[in-house]
Every structure is written in structure tokens, then in C-alpha cells.
Amino acid sequence: MRASLKLIIEFCHFWFGVVFMDLLIKNGKVVWPDVTLEADLAIDAGKIIGIGSGDVFPKADRVVDAGGNFVVPGGIDPHVHMHVGFMGATTLDEFDTGTMAAAIGGTTTVIDFAFQAKGKLPMESIEARRKEADGKVCIDYTLHSNLTEGNDASIAQIPKIIEMGIPSFKFFMVYRKEELMIDDGNLIPIMEEIKKHGGLAGCHTENVSIIEFLQEQAIKKGNKSPIYHALTRPPINEAEALNRALYISKYLDSAFYDYHLSVKEGVELIRQARKEGFPAYCETTTHYLTLEEDMYKRPDGLNFICSPPLRTRDHIEELWRGLADGTISAVASDQAAFTLEHKKMGKDSFNKVPNGLPGMEFRVPLMFSEGVQKGRISVNRMAAVTSTNVAKIFGLYPKKGAIEIGSDADLVILDPKIKKKITIDDCPYKIDWTPFEGIELQGSPVMTISKGKIIAENGKFVGKTGEGEFVKGKISEEILKRPAA
Ligand code: URP
Ligand code: ZN
Ligand code: ZN
């Protein structure tokens, strides 16, 4: 809808009859994926009830002056791992401390994973994950189901999982030795079942056989330093697996989501698939957009081990191009808060380091600073890739990811003038390092609002633990049929 029309229609209807409302945000530059407008936002009972000029709204209990700063949709991080065991270590942040950190950084919804535990059914892992999160989360959350076994009993649970509001799945094409991998043959019946019931299948795309071969060779030669993590997972390795996953998806005519894309060849594969009209979606992460492979050559190189690995500058620039031209739909943090102590598990060999990096508190600030301020993407595109597209793809829209009448009032006020250098002292939970140390930020969230309540202000969490809720997703037909976000 055109912005001016949007204002007129929304003005007239929805706050009619409300005498007092909870919150008015005035003097903001409100950012939608298609337009930025100076507007005030009326909020009551956790929802947006008016968009326009505050003069005509009912009286508000609280008025926040956005002072001409941007008001963007609350961030939705499509990929986080809170307090989860992986490669022999458990990530540090709990659902309370982790979601507090996310809130401070401008995120109001996270999507975590329920890893199917060995010998258990996926539903048991989902129930266990919900027990861990419910009552603890400070912002809303949902889950992806991460199937690690493709047996009949697991496949039989797919319809129920989708029906309960978890329509998205992840499969590892890697981690064979860790017994997390789903092999190609098994992907067929799993993806068929997901498609049949309106879900979205997605993969961690790396070629396991290439990695195993190259790792074995490297270790035999005594090449165990962190740079060999990248050298044993070359770009071709990820591109080949993505190509294979896309072929399988096309064969099944089933929409596909690629988790944490890091290579330029992959951007081109997704670009082509989408040009053909195929519903291929992908996310990249803030670390692939900002950190280079050379980090592995530093004395602390092992800390940066994540999979896929960090890449060279040419890949980074193509990821930004892919974000700008609409090929890459979303930006995740892939939050996996392993401490320096955890990382030392691999001091003698790169393949023993728990894979993953912390940083969800810097996802929105980095996208604004590195993306918008450096002219790589518009502020509107930033709103799309950090929020609106995620909500659309995973079936949370328009409750989430939208500044529209009736949507949850999940909003972030972002001041483009604030300058600060990222330092570990600003990490709001007990993690002892950040991969983004020293990056200069130009612009940061100054207020985060979740369901109409102010939960973070100027780098401090001011909300309440446990006020976040599980949100159910239902993916639209449009998303599953054609590239629609
Ligand atoms: O290195 C990573 N990405 N660790 C987290 C697990 C995953 O594959 O997403
Ligand atoms: Zn992964
Ligand atoms: Zn991950």
C-alpha cells in the first residue's frame, strides 16, 4: 500500500473508541521496508493502534519523544543457539540473559533451535526446549525443529510439529562424526513430508566428505592451526552442498531456506534460483558480513572458528551486494556464545574447537553501522532483512516484523548519531570476549519496545524476565510458492 494512503486509512479506524492509550511515540522517522515517514505511533494493549499525527490520538499514559531518530520494526533474529550443548561444550547464555542481551541490541524476537537429541523423537526435544525457555525469556521467541534422525518415527511427527506452530526445519549436511547429519537420501522423505504439511525445509550446507578428507590430510601433515579450519572448508565445499540442496528442493518442488550463507558462489546460486521463480531463501550472518578469514592467522585465531568459516573480502562484498539486490533475505547472528575457555578445547587442533560465535546484541547496530551508514543498504532494506522478511518467511507476519495497525508494538528507536567502539565491557551477559571487538559503530538502538512495553533503554535492560512468549508460526502459501521475501 502507498504510504500516504496507509496513513489516511489507518488514521480513521483503529483507535476509535480508545479514550486513554498506553504509549505514544512521537517525532520518529518511521521505517518500513518500502518507505520512511515522519510519523507518530499510538500503542495500546501491546498493539499498534494508530500511525499518523499524535495530535489526533487519544491521550497516552506515557509519551516517548523519538527526537527525530529512526523507529524501526523490532529485530527478529532468525538463528540463535542459547544454552545448548554442541561439540562438547554448552553455550553460555541462558534464555533470560541471552534475550536480555538481544533486547538491548534492538531484537524483540529470536528463533532458537530444538536439536533432536540422540535416540529421542523431535517432539521430545521441542517440549524440553520450551520448558527451558518459557517463563525465562524476556522477549518473544519461537523455534526451528532441527531433525538429526530421519527414521520413520521422526518423520511421522512432522505434521504435528508444523501444526503446533513450528513450521521451519533445519538439517545438517555436515557433522557426520558428531551424529547430527541427515544424509541426502533421507532428505527426500523428510522434505516431502514438510512440503505436504506447509512447512519450510532448510539446511546447513557444507559437503561433509570434502571436509572429512581435507581435515584428515591436514592433520596427518601436522597442519592443526586455526587457519586450517578455513582451508579444509573451502568455498566450493559450501557452494557444492547448496547446489545439491537446491537440486533436491527443485526436484521435490519444495521451498528451501539456506542457513548462514557465507560464499559468493552461493549468492549466485540463490540469485539464479529466485530469478527462475523458485522459492529459495537464505540468510547470512553479521560475522560473515564483517570479519575476514585472516582472523584465523591471529594468535587468538581459534576463537573465530565457526562453520562455515569466515571468508575473504571478495565473498564479504558479494554478500553485501546480495543483501542490497534482494537475493539474501535475512541477517542472523547465529549466536553461539562459547567462552575463551571453551575455545581452548581446540588449542592443539582446529577441529576440536566448538564451532560458533557470540554477538546477537550487535546484529542490529552492525547492520545499521556497516550497512546503512556505509551506503551498502538503505535503512528500509535494513528493516526488511533484520525483521520484516524474517517474519514473512517463518510465518510470524504481520503480528511480528510490521509497523502496521494491529501488529505487536515491537519497535526500536535507533539514534544514528551515537558513536561507540564495540568492546567486551558492553556485552550485557557474562561472555568474556566478542568477535567484533574494536569495530566502530555509528548509530545504535537507544530504546527497545516489546509488545508496547519499554524493555531496554540506553544499553540497559529495564524489562521483566519471563514476559516473552512462544509465538506460533504459519507460513503463507505465497512464501512457499515463489520468492516472496
Ligand atoms: O559454527 C556454527 N555455525 N555453530 C552453530 C551451529 C550451526 O551450525 O549453526
Ligand atoms: Zn549450521
Ligand atoms: Zn547456528
Image: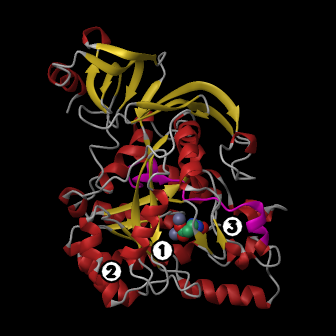
Q: Quadrant of residue 458?
A: top right
What residue sits 52% from the left and 73% below the top? 238
The three-letter amino acid code for the residue at tag 2 is Ile
Q: CA distance from mark 1 to mark 2?
A: 12 Å
Q: Provide the secondary structure element on which disc 3 rests.
A: loop
Q: Is residue 297 visible?
A: yes
Work out whether 189 lies above or below 307: below
Up-down relation of residue 85 to residue 211 (above or below): above
Residue at which label 1 appears: 205
Residue 78 visible from this viewpoint: no
What residue is shown with label 3? 305
Which mark is nearer the camera, 3 or 2? 3
Marks 3/1 in contact by CB < 8 Å: the verdict is: no
Q: Residue at x 59, y 88 (%)?
A: 177
Badge 1 amino acid:
Thr
- Mark number for residue 248? 2
Rendered residue at 46%/60% (across/down): 112
Q: Nearer the viewer, residue 60 or 203?
A: 60
Span of residues in magenta: 323-344
